[in-house]
Image (cartoon, helix red, strand yellow):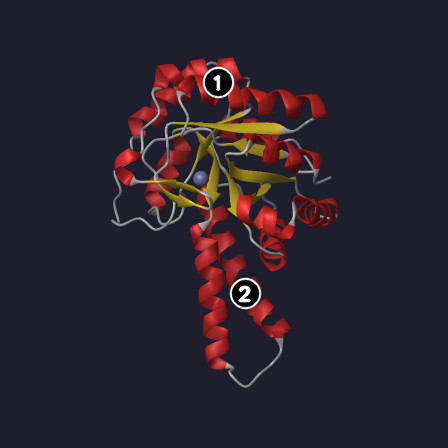
Amino acid sequence: MAIVDAKEMLLKATAERYAVGAFNCTNLIQMEAVVEAAVELKAPLILQASVAPSKFLSPAVIGVIYKTLAQSAPIPICLHLDHCSDVQFCKLCADAGYTNIMIDASKQEFSENIRQTKEVVDYCHRLGNISVEGELGTVSGVEDQVKVAEDEAQLCDPQQAMAFVEQTGIDIFAPAIGTAHGVYKTKDPRLDFDRLKKIAEMINGQKPRVPLVIHGGTGLQPDVVKKLVSLGGSKYNVSTDLKHTLIDTTYAYISDHRQEYNPGKIDASVKEAIKGRISYWIGLLGSAGKA
Ligand SMILES: [Zn+2]
């Protein structure tokens, strides 16, 4: 089954109050690990690639890997382009088989954010069942090509959120509520739960219409994650955790096996470690058994 529309997948999650894990991958081993873990737990899945790995491997290669993995998997899987601020590259990835595109024009003025987001929405909807995620307000930290200082980050205004959703026609919405990319400096970051609750009620209160995304998912405490999901976050992004797992596991393996020259064994150890992290997140998000 496997290749599906992200909006449909996330509307179900919104209605049933769980979140689909959206996991950033930079290579084939990570993608395989994420898919295998989700299959074992029967969880719907969003594979994500941000702009740098999409350019490094090329959208065409990522698109083919995704299709190959997704078509044979017994769970629904989407391929999402994460945080792309370049309208043309968004279109290129949509052409290459990504099923879900995030245009991140959140650093632009409100009207320009709407204009660029709508251009991508119109293009993707003309092309077929390709859903589009837009962002309003800014998430601090560094995600690939997008850098936002903590004091520059702006939380999403609920009234503007309604206008943004309606005027752009986006399928999925990322409101900035105080989460951050990268590693949190404190164990207890200040998140604006009330803001998320209000936005969720305004947009999805009558019936689920536009699923909400939580960015900067790494490093939040389990009770915080569950609260964000219960308040209406139904796509939960995890990137930093998987980068650290990849690099730390590779480093540890090579340190312990300095005289061994067998790349397959490094890959196998990375795969197991990533699968462990994905199982953790899927358990927390409540998406196991929902495929
Ligand atoms: Zn993000």
Is residue 46 rendered to the left or right of residue 1?
left
Which type of secondary structure does the marked residue at label 2 adopt? helix
The mark nearer the N terminus, 2 or 1, is 1
- Residue 94 vs residue 216, the one in the foreground: 94
- Residue 169 vs residue 123, the one in the foreground: 123
Task: Tell me which corner region of the image, top left, top right, bottom left or bottom right, holds residue 199.
Answer: top left
Q: Is residue 201 above or below residue 187?
A: above
Q: Residues within 10 Å of mark 1 (few under 14, many from 20)?
A: many
Give me the disc on residue 270.
2
At 60% from the left and 81% from the top, the residue drawn is 261
Which type of secondary structure does the marked residue at label 1 adopt? helix
**Residue 250 placement (x, y as % from top left):** 50, 69
- Residue position for label 1: 165
At 38% from the left and 29% from the top, the residue drawn is 231
At 54% from the left and 65% from the top, the residue drawn is 270
Locate the C terminus and report the quarter of the image it occupies: top right
**Residue 287 placement (x, y as % from top left):** 52, 41
Residue 55 shows up from this direction: yes
**Residue 168 placement (x, y as % from top left):** 52, 17
At 31% from the left and 34% from the top, the residue drawn is 153
